[in-house]
Image: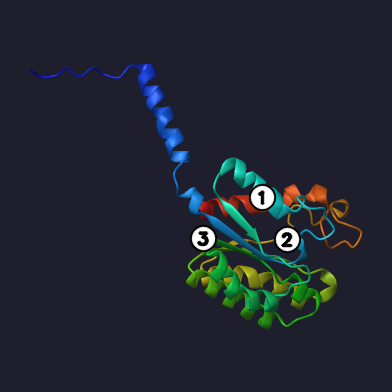
Amino acid sequence: MRRRRFPLGRWQAFALLLVWVFAWHATPGWAASRILVVGDSLSAGYGLTQGEGWVDLLTQKLGRERPGTTVINASISGDTTAGGLARLPALLEKHRPDIVIIELGGNDGLRGAPVATTRANLRRMIELAKAAPARVLLLGMRMPPNFGPTYTAQFEAMYAELARAQGAALVPFFLERIATDLGKFQPDRIHPTAAAQPELVATVWPALMKLLR
């Protein structure tokens, strides 16, 4: 005797949809996502108390919205692209990240380092990260106008050129949301205040979500 099949009722269908949604959010793919942040004082939380920096806030946000995602903050105040490049191989070997966020270059520019040298260091960092293999998010920086129009233009263009040539994701200017508001900076006018850190997270978030998908 053939068994009759009854069509799903509206509430049964809704219940199955909820089960599917919860199962999708619980997939182990998110647990495997490891994000390595290699940056300078902007990411190390200079002048802030523990837990106030944008990387800490990003970690908290990911914990709520993408459970299982791990963030490793390997940022060091004062670091340059040369320092980041020297440290990166060991960091990649130790943490095996799925995504590498590179927030470096600002200190190179403030010290007047040749743009070609900074570009070469960043390019090698991207190459190493991709070979790991990991996806790369590059956070761009700009120099103050007092460095001269030629240097500032070349420095800013460097990030977009690298992202395009190396196939990396890009945030064109990491401080875009706060750059013109001195009230968002500490007295040194270089490092963002605690109140400005959520703005930095908001700047990075859209590009990072595209990589996580």
Q: Is residue 118 left or right of residue 97?
A: right
Residue 202 seen in render: no
Q: Position of residue 165 (x, y in %)?
A: 53, 72
Q: Position of residue 113 (x, y in %)?
A: 75, 81
Which residue carries the number 2 mark? 43
The answer to which image quadrant residue 126 occupies is bottom right
Q: Is residue 188 left or right of residue 17?
A: right
Quadrant location, the N terminus = top left
Which residue carries the number 1 mark? 58
Q: Quick check: marks 2 and 1 in contact, CB under 8 Å?
A: no
Amino acid type at circle 1 is Leu
Residue 6 seen in render: yes
Distance in Å between CA atoms under marks 1 and 3: 16 Å
The foreground one among 15 and 203 is 15
The answer to which image quadrant residue 94 occupies is bottom right
Which residue carries the number 3 mark? 98
